Image: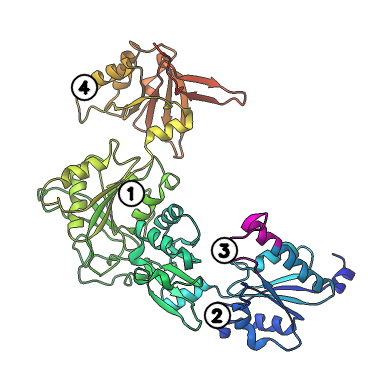
């Protein structure tokens, strides 16, 4: 836009007025309203504008007022373009009305409650006009900040992630996002409140959730979300799941119940040896317990029933975590697991970690259940899927005996190594397949060989876990010999190593060429059936896939 054009046109302002109390308007917002020729504001068809009511004391008789009245809010419409079409037409018409003032050289202030670019009506004018006219946006205090201030609850601290969600999302989506985040605010309640409440309950966040209605305005109300009658909820209300860290006592502050391991005087960031579970021999060292950096104090002094949640972290880092697992790890007061898997979980203030060697599964399960008996929320961290060659079996085996039978135990699924490796290679598990561990630590090799014969004879694709280690070097060679009795030498074999990790590699070789020296405990093998195809595509990549249709006869 040229200098002469700028002189001929007015200036557009998007003005945030804050959450409702006129005293929370910024100085700049008041200045812009005073300078403006035209004050524009949105409202429903009843004509009452919250934005105008906030700014009323600053409006003058000579202000030109443009009431931009929505044709619809939540009701249906007979517009040929439907609800979205009706709104788009309205925004275009409203923008044209403002453009006429701007073209006449008038300064236009579009006022908006909260912040104009945060779920604000002004943003629709901004998208249509800001590229055509000189524009300035004046930020405002959001309803989120006002709600947190009224509750006296920090929204997020340290590395916590705050998620802002519209209540209009589908219930399943709301549930997943609430389960996976640290702290949350859900906007736009009103008619969505029953859905939001169910999502809070299903995600386990309802006990933490607060309700704030008309923050800083007349008629303000704050309560526990669980106590709210859905029939009384207006649109201008929010739900807040505040910081968990903020509720922790200061570092070093002892509580009545002490630390998880009963060592109430443990210093922050100290590493101590946790006592063996009550039913374990006194000489058994169950785990190494480490406090998170900000202290050993309990997250919540309110008594609550303990539970154990067995969580699958997937084959590698956070990208493989499900929302439900992410939420369970965040909510846990104690994390129990093999050191390698615990290292995948971010440190959180107030959580205690009980790390142990990979060969003490029963002791690890007893420790977790013993902590839960004391009222602790415990997450047992397992790699992959906890129910596939992992910790869920060990926990449930112990939980089915006294004195642990009454302790709630949940198992959350994770992405198992076979699925992760198959996805990297293509779709080798597209038809029937068998999952077999080659480790003879918990079952004799004769049983493994018998199962390999049976599965290979049935022409199943094979996903082979735990194929080799420093102490087991011959099983892969024996497996290759056995499978060649049933499979052609050129049967595709996928060697998937460290999937999702920094050393990830995926290779496909012929069964006859499978080299045992190229296989270790971080490798998973997928052996194709007679129908599995390995095809090199035009872009140079090789994909392995097994048809879903099996030939008759």
Counting from the top left corner in percent of width and height, residue 542 is at 53, 24
Q: Look at the numbered discs 1 and 2 and tell me whether their residues touch, using CB distance below 8 Å.
A: no
Q: Please report contact status of discs 3 and 1: CB closer than 8 Å, yes or no.
A: no
Q: Indicate the quadrant where residue 516 lies.
A: top left
Residue 363: image x %, image y %? 18, 46
Q: Which residues are magenta?
A: 70-89
Name the residue beneath numbered marker 4: 447
Of 397 and 279, nearer the camera is 397
Q: Residues within 10 Å of mark 3 (few under 14, many from 20)?
A: few
- The residue sitting at 22% across, 53% down in the picture is 408
The residues tagged by marks 3 and 2 sit, at their Cα atoms, a distance apart of: 26 Å
What kind of element bears circle 3?
A: loop
Q: Could you tell me residue 489's position as x and y percent?
A: 41, 11
Residue 60 is covered by the magenta coloring: no
Kindly tell me whether residue 83 is visible in this rendering.
yes
Counting residues from the start of the chain, the first of labels 3 and 4 encountered is 3
Instruction: For residue 360, say whether it is visible.
Output: no
């Amino acid at each position: 836009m040229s200098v002469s054009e700028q002189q001929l046109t007015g200036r557009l302002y998007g003005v945030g007025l804050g959450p409702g109390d006129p005293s929370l308007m910024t100085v700049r917002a008041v200045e812009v309203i005073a300078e403006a020729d035209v004050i524009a504001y949105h409202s429903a068809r009843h004509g009452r504008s919250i934005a105008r009511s906030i700014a009323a004391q600053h409006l003058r008789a000579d202000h030109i007022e443009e009431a931009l009245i929505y044709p619809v809010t939540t009701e249906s419409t007979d517009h040929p373009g439907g609800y979205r079409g009706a709104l788009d037409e309205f925004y275009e018409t409203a923008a044209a009305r403002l453009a006429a003032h701007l073209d006449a050289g008038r300064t236009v202030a579009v006022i908006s409650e909260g912040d104009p670019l945060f779920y604000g009506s002004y943003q629709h004018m901004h998208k249509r006009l800001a590229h055509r006219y000189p524009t300035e946006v004046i930020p405002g205090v959001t309803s989120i900040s006002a709600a947190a201030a009224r509750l006296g609850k920090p929204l997020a601290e340290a590395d916590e992630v705050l998620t802002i969600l519209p209540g209009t999302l589908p219930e399943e989506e709301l549930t997943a996002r609430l389960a996976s985040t640290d702290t949350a605010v859900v906007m736009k309640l009103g008619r969505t409140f029953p859905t939001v409440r169910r999502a809070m309950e299903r995600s386990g966040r309802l006990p933490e959730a607060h309700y704030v209605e008309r923050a800083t305005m007349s008629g303000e109300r704050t309560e526990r979300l669980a106590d709210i009658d859905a029939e009384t909820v207006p649109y201008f209300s929010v739900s807040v799941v505040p910081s968990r860290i903020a509720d922790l006592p200061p570092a070093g502050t002892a509580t009545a119940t002490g630390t998880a391991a009963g060592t109430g005087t443990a210093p922050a960031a100290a590493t101590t040896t946790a006592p063996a579970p009550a039913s374990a021999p006194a000489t058994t060292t169950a785990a190494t317990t480490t406090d998170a950096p900000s202290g050993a104090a309990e997250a919540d002094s309110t008594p609550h029933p303990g539970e154990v949640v067995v969580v699958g972290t997937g084959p590698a880092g956070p990208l493989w975590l499900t929302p439900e697992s992410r939420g369970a790890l965040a909510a846990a007061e104690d994390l129990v697991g093999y050191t390698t898997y615990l290292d995948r979980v971010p440190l959180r203030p107030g959580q205690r970690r009980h790390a142990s060697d990979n060969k003490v599964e029963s002791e690890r399960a007893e420790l977790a259940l013993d902590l839960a008996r004391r009222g602790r929320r415990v997450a047992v961290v397992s790699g992959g899927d906890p129910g596939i060659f992992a910790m869920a079996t060990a926990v449930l085996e112990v939980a089915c005996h006294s004195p642990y039978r009454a302790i709630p135990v949940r198992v959350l699924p994770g992405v198992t190594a076979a699925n992760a490796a198959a996805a990297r290679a293509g779709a080798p598990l597209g038809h029937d397949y068998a999952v077999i561990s080659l480790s003879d630590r918990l079952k004799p090799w004769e049983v493994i060989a018998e199962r390999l014969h049976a599965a290979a004879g049935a022409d199943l694709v094979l996903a082979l876990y735990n194929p080799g280690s420093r102490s087991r070097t011959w099983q892969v060679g024996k497996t290759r010999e056995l499978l060649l009795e049933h499979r052609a030498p050129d049967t595709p074999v996928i060697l998937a190593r460290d999937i999702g990790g920094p050393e990830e590699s995926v290779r496909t070789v012929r069964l006859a060429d499978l080299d045992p020296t190229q296989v270790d405990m971080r490798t998973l093998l997928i052996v194709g059936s007679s129908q599995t195809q390995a095809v090199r595509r035009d872009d140079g990549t090789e994909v392995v896939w097994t048809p879903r249709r099996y030939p008759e006869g």
